[in-house]
Image (cartoon, helix red, strand yellow):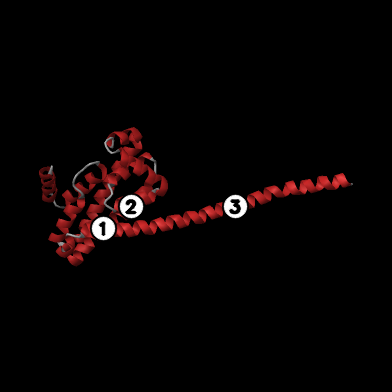
Amino acid sequence: MHNIVLQISNLFHSWGMAGLFANATIESCLPGFPLPPDVLLIAMCLSLPQKALLYALICTTGSITGALIGYCVGRFGGRPLFNYLFRSKMDKLETVDKLFEEYGAFAVFFSAFSPIPYNIFAIASGITKMNVFKFWFVSCLGRGGRFFFVSIMLMLFGDTIKENMNYFIIGVSVLLIAFFAVLYKKRHSITGKKSDDISCTKTIVESKPNVNEADMEQEYANN
């Protein structure tokens, strides 16, 4: 398996920027693809740091292209296809369902930026019929943020940071997840409070006619 991955990596590397685009595209739409584009992106950024931002843009564009393909697969293939593709990973399917139910578009952003398999969420976004423009937007933020972060860090620190790049990505991912989790809960607590206030107001308004009607009946009886 290691030899196959190495051969694929060498093939993509020999294609240059086209290989980087192809690697990013395939990885975003093909479940189980063993070669993340970060490997080739890091190698190319280290060899030509002055083109690091261009490489990040190419990698982001390819990844979003692949994600849109995955989205279409999910949209038109539906859950039966999703179950077939991930039949050996049903526990991951349940996790994805829970994340989508709880966080929606935020879940796509987390998977796009972090080491979580992005292609699963791309396909799942199509199945759940997430708005395609929302999917595209959060994917651009997540994938662009990740690849540009890697490229800028390599431009600034070069080989000294290469070995610890995954730790930096995971660390930033944890901070982003914590931030958005707090933001999400705060927004929903405010929304819930507003809903309770509206319900309370509606109850009071609806109860007023009943009280007036009872008073009128009592007054009429007294007379």
Residue 37, percent from left and from top: 20, 51
Specify the amino acid type for callout 1.
Answer: Ile
Q: Which residue is mark 1?
A: 169
Local crowd size for mark 3, using a 10 Å CA cut-off: few (<14), some (14–19), many (≥20): few
Tell me the number on the disc at residue 198: 3
Q: Secondary structure at mark 2?
A: helix
Q: Is residue 33 visible?
A: yes
- Identify the amino acid type marked 2: Phe
Q: Which residue is mark 2?
A: 110
Q: Where residue 101 sits in the image (x, y, percent)?
A: 41, 45
**Mark closest to the chain's N terminus, 2 or 3:** 2
Front residue of 101 and 46: 101
Residues under labels 2 and 3: Cα distance? 33 Å
Under mark 3, the amino acid is: Ile
> In the rendering, at what x and y percent does residue 121 appear?
32, 45
Alpha carbon distance from label 3 to label 1: 43 Å
Q: Determine whether, in the image, residue 98 is placed left or right of residue 41.
A: right
Which is more N-terminal, label 1 or label 3?
A: 1
